[in-house]
């Protein structure tokens, strides 16, 4: 049952959700892309079809998943990195989920109804679908861009399962100096993650002078992707 549910989610993501997002982004002038939480390249496979893009930096901390991601590193226009982006540079423990696209740094609210349902559907057990922990290297966006002499990001895509706040906090210099043009960020509508607030993200982005352009709700699941533009 859990394999079928996981397969169904992947099919809807590839054939419906990602296509809607791509159609919207294809009308924008996007050249430099950062894919934070690239997983196996679901977003990368879509976004690399943009005619105007020059380079994609794809970040995936899970070692086994990264080995699959780097197969997409076809030329020097796509750079895959086995690295997590956070609010500090160092090492963090990543909770590995049975459905690897939902592995997370975030503290889980085990009393959440959505968490229990997700664990049952994906893991076959109401208690947990998390199966392991893995130490991963982390960097802030500010540190990474400074080290690699990257001055601007046209599109910053963030899909980090409740760790979106920390990613943005680690990009304070880039945001302050208006070096990021568009942000595509996942919003979680359930209460599965502790210390997570959609209100905080909305306020943070507004204070950073970003305007919401569009929302993309994922069918039958409790999250949506939102696209923001720098004013």
Image: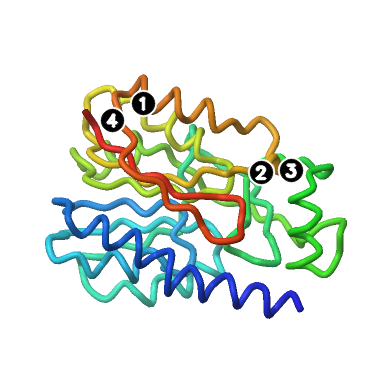
Quadrant in the rendering for residue 14: bottom left
Which percent across, then down, holds residue 168? 42, 33
Where is residue 83? Give x, y as percent: 46, 53
Instruction: Measure how far apart labels 3 and 4 are at the Cα level.
Output: 30 Å
Q: Position of residue 61 (x, y in %)?
A: 52, 56
Q: Residue at x 65, y 66 (%)?
A: 99
Q: Earlier in the sequence, mark 3 or mark 4?
A: 3
Q: Nearer the viewer, mark 1 or mark 3?
A: 3
Q: Viewer-nearest of labels 2 and 4?
A: 2
Label 1 – label 3 distance at C-alpha = 26 Å
In the rendered image, which residue does mark 3 sit on? 108
Q: Is residue 139 above or below residue 83?
A: above
Q: Which residue is mark 1?
A: 172
Mark 4 Cα shell of 10 Å, populated few (<14), some (14-19), many (≥20): some
Mark whose residue sits in front, 3 or 4: 3
Q: Are marks 1 and 4 in contact (CB under 8 Å)?
A: yes
The residue positioned 74% from the left and 43% from the top of the image is: 108
Residue 98 numbered tag: none
Q: Secondary structure at mark 4?
A: helix
Residue 196 position, x and y percent, is 62, 33
How far is disc 1 from disc 4 in space, using C-alphas? 6 Å
SS of the residue under disc 3: loop
Q: Residues within 10 Å of mark 1 (few under 14, many from 20)?
A: some
Quadrant in the picture for the N terminus: bottom right
Q: Name the quarter where the C terminus is drawn.
A: top left
Q: Earlier in the sequence, mark 2 or mark 3?
A: 3
Q: Secondary structure at mark 2?
A: loop
Alpha carbon separation for disc pair 2 and 4:
29 Å
Circle 2 sits on which residue?
190
Q: Which residue is mark 4?
A: 174
Front one among 36 and 205: 205
């Amino acid at each position: 049952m859990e394999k079928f549910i996981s397969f169904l989610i992947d099919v809807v993501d590839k054939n419906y959700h990602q296509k809607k997002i791509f159609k919207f982004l294809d009308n924008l002038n996007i050249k430099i892309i950062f894919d934070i939480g690239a997983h196996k390249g679901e977003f990368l496979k879509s976004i690399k079809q943009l005619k105007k893009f020059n380079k994609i930096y794809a970040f995936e901390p899970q070692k086994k998943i990264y080995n699959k991601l780097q197969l997409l590193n076809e030329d020097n226009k796509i750079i895959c990195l086995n690295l997590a982006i956070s609010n500090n540079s160092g090492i963090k423990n990543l909770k590995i989920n049975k459905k690897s696209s939902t592995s997370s740094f975030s503290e889980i609210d085990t009393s959440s109804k959505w968490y229990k349902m997700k664990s049952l559907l994906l893991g076959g057990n109401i208690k947990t679908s998390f199966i392991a922990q893995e130490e991963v290297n982390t960097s802030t966006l500010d540190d990474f861009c400074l080290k690699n002499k990257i001055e601007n990001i046209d599109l910053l895509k963030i899909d980090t399962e409740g760790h979106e706040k920390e990613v943005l906090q680690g990009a304070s210099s880039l945001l302050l100096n208006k070096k990021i043009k568009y942000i595509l960020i996942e919003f979680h509508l359930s209460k599965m993650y502790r210390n997570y607030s959609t209100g905080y993200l909305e306020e943070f982005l507004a204070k950073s002078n970003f305007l919401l352009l569009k929302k993309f709700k994922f069918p039958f699941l409790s999250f949506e992707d939102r696209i923001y533009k720098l004013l």
